[in-house]
Amino acid sequence: MKIALLLLAAAAAGAQVRTVAEEEVLRVHRSALIIDGHNDVTSKTVRGFDIARPTAEGHTDIARMRQGGIGAQFFAAYVAVNYMDSNQSAQRALQMIDTIRHDIVGKNPRDFLLALSAADIEQARREGRIAALIGIEGGHAIEEDLRLLRQFYNLGARYLSFTHTRHLSWAGSSGEVGQQGLSDFGRSVVAEMNRLGMMIDVSHISDRTLADTLAATRAPVFASHSSCRALANVPRNLTDEQIRGIAKGGGVIMVNFYCQFLLGRPKTQASIDDVVRHIDHIKRIAGVEAIGLGSDFDGIDCAPTGLEDVSKFPNLTRKLLEKGYSEREIRQIYGENFLRFMRSVEQAAESR
Ligand SMILES: [Zn+2]
């Protein structure tokens, strides 16, 4: 009787009621292709950190990526805004792309395949390698020149986040006050990315720039590492309207694991349940097809309990199964939604 009441109370609170065996967790986990939209270990590898050396430091190394079952990883070619002050943004982007191509992929060919397409991600999986992808974080990298954008694409960059924490002349950032939108040049960046088949990342941009981008683009857009503002009220997160707008176009919202973006409060410890809350919210307002994962590992100083580093992804599979998510939904959230989105960007480019 007592147990029945407890179960009822748990069900009423929306808590887990299903018991899931470890065997099921591992079976479902291995069946899914996990694609993570954003990892900043590149800020360490560019200074000499060896991703092949197992360590307990930080969030990422090859052994822990294998343990976590990562199928594809977007590595951030992150360009800090202070490089704008010395006009070295493009140079920095080249250094960051080089650390991905040379230090991460080039030195570890058995573990990584540089992926340039959705087909390459699947190819890497068939070969038992992790697909490594390049995403440029900070549109100042192109120094207001579409020729540089094209050359970064040629080097393998497959997404560009228009801004980091500062407004650009052509796009507004969520990190600054004032709602700067997309300029004419900003719209030409959108058009050129559509033409190339390069994915537009709306993480870090201002609300007005996001609205302008949705209005200008011919292809779907996505958020590589953002969560829900309805649950955690910070400008870096997306409003319900934005989430629906991205989903309507066929894009995905890759949920960020940063404690502050999960809870909306600084210096508070989040847990894996908070990640699930954000996943639940997107599912409720926009459908399961709109969900992805964008951990931001090694770019955050607080990761949720239960998701402390890249090795812990199986814990999320357990939580989702306990919450009643189906095997199919988990596969969609982990990678299938993103692959669908990436393919539609590639197809939009081909059909111009
Ligand atoms: Zn970021």
Image (cartoon, rainbow, N blue to C red):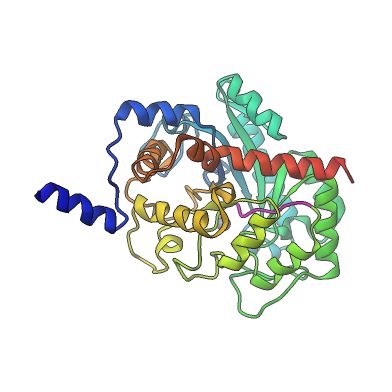
| Residue pictured at 81% horizontal, 50% vertical | 194
Disc tally is: 0
From the top left corner, tell me how far across and down residue 11 is, in percent.
28, 53
Q: What residue do we see at 80% from left, 64% from top?
A: 186
Q: Is residue 258 left or right of residue 2?
A: right
Within the magenta stretch, is there residue 222? yes
Q: Let me know if residue 83 is in the magenta part.
A: no
Q: Is residue 156 above or below residue 239?
A: above
User: Which image quadrant is residue 36 in?
Assistant: top right
Is residue 52 positioned above or below 333 on the image? above
Q: Which residue is rendered at x = 52% and y = 40% of the image?
A: 334
Q: Is residue 85 above or below residue 283?
A: below
Give residue 110's position: percent from left, percent from top.
57, 20
Residue 85 appears anywhere in the view: no
Q: Residue lying at the far right in this picture: please name it.
A: 352
- The percent coordinates of residue 317 (x first, y second) are 40, 38
Where are the magenta residues, as a range?
219-224
Q: Residue at x 35, y 52 (%)?
A: 273
